[in-house]
Image (tube, rainbow, N blue to C red):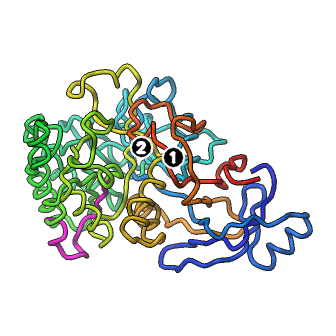
Amino acid sequence: MASPRLLSQVQLLEGPGLPPRRTDVLLEHGRLAAEGEAARARAAALGLRPLEASGWWLAPPLVDPHSVLEDPHTGRAETLDSLARSAVAAGYGWVALLPQARRWRDAPEALQLAAPADSGLALRLWGSLSVGGDGQELAPQAEQLAAGAVGLAEGPQLPPLALLERSLALGEMEGAPVLLAPRDRALSQQGLVREGVEALRAGWPMDPPLSETLPLQGLLALAAQHPQRQLRLMNLSTAAAVDLLAALPAAGRPAASVSWWHLLADSGSLDPIAEGWRVEPPLGTPADRAALIDALAGGVLSAVAVHHAPLDPEEQLLPLDQRKPGVAGHRFVLPALWQELVLGRGWSPERLWEALCWGPARFLALEEPRLATGGSAWILFDPQQPWQASSDPEAPLAANQPLGDRQLRGQVLATGLRASLWRGPT
């Protein structure tokens, strides 16, 4: 933000459990400098005219609990620089990267990765539970956590339960989160979508819910045997899995994430030639998507993950069944979910921030972000701002962006994490 601005009657989301309120706010040098009468007095001294901001929201930055970046420095699909620039412009202040990389992050020396100093992004790294993520041998877990890992994670499917049981019994992770995907590829039948009427009509190869529910049952049994461990479930995708989780008492229920894309797309709503079919776990039926949304609203699911998994243009040209799974784009999450959940389903903005900010922070065992006078940890969001994804200068490098050709509504106008960014009226 090149110059200070006085926002008139902007709506504030200050922190979890606090109702929104309206006030005047002065933004100066990337800081939330003052509010109320103090903001108006300072703005008058600076000769500022107020900006009408009654439809805008000032809130803490968002938190992405897990994404993928395989080649941070020379990647053609994405680099750390491009990821940090795009994520911050999309309203994200924290991004946690999974250990999956060209050099798997399974040792202290592999965890020496930091976001660019001028990006404003706080980068967190998941360590690896096993060496190389192959589920055969335990990695040096205590050493990774001592080197700053936010917790331990594996790849997109569950490691052998015997190895996991051994790790939890040894307890080198102590109270750190352990992130695991309840997925067994051997049960997937190489399907691209979940079983359902829509998949049958389209002729898609189908992946049964059993590929998620069976490993989930094993994980829940281990969680019950080791209640002192902080198990996290990654990317739940089926109504059957939600039912298994909801049947547990809240106090004994592992925290679970859901991909933003599984909240927006399903096998009945996505065009057969559209981008976004090739994801892991696969897209479910309309009933699966409805169950995921209800579970997120009810607190059975704890966090929305971007799970940014970029592909380069050559990889994106491969046939659907030969390319790596995943979708990309932090910049779509807030505007798309605002349209789907707040406008479409009547969620309150604070419920959405619980799913995108405060819940993901707890998922990572981080302190919940809050607005603070004098602080730069804030974003300014206009739910009505139209923008064209294909002409966005803050776009990431990734080729697999499912909304990359869309006209969207709702955009982050500014963030204290990058004071030069301003997309609002002048």
- What is the CA distance from the residue labelled 1 to the residue labelled 2? 8 Å
In the rendered image of this protein, does residue 155 appear above or below residue 263? Answer: above
The answer to the question of whether label 1 and label 2 lie on touching residues, with beta carbons closer than 8 A, is yes
Q: Position of residue 205 (x, y in %)?
A: 11, 36
Tell which circle, 1 or 2, labels the residue nearer the N-terminal end. Answer: 2
Q: Answer left or right for 37 relative to 309.
A: right
Eyeballing the image, is 107 above or below 334?
above
Residue sitting at x 37%, y 57%: 304
* Local SS, label 1: strand
Kind of element beneath mark 2: strand
> Residue 373 shows which numbered tag?
none
Tell me if 39 is positioned left or right of 80 in this view: right
Q: Which residue is mark 1?
A: 123
Q: Residue at x 47, y 71 (%)?
A: 350
Question: Is 250 inside the magenta-drawn segment?
Answer: yes
Q: Specify whether 422 is left or right of 312.
A: right
Residue 101 vs residue 203, the one in the foreground: 203
Magenta stretch: give its range: 244-258
Percent of width and height locating residue 208: 8, 47
At which x and y percent is residue 277? Answer: 26, 38
> Which residue in the protein does label 2 denote?
97
Q: Quadrant of residue 381?
A: bottom right
How packed mark 2 is, by other alpha carbons closer than 10 Å (few <14, some 14-19, many 20 or more), is: many
Name the side, left or right, on which 344 lies relative to 226.
Answer: right
Q: Position of residue 179 (x, y in %)?
A: 29, 52
Residue at 48% from the left image edge and 54% from the top image edge:
335
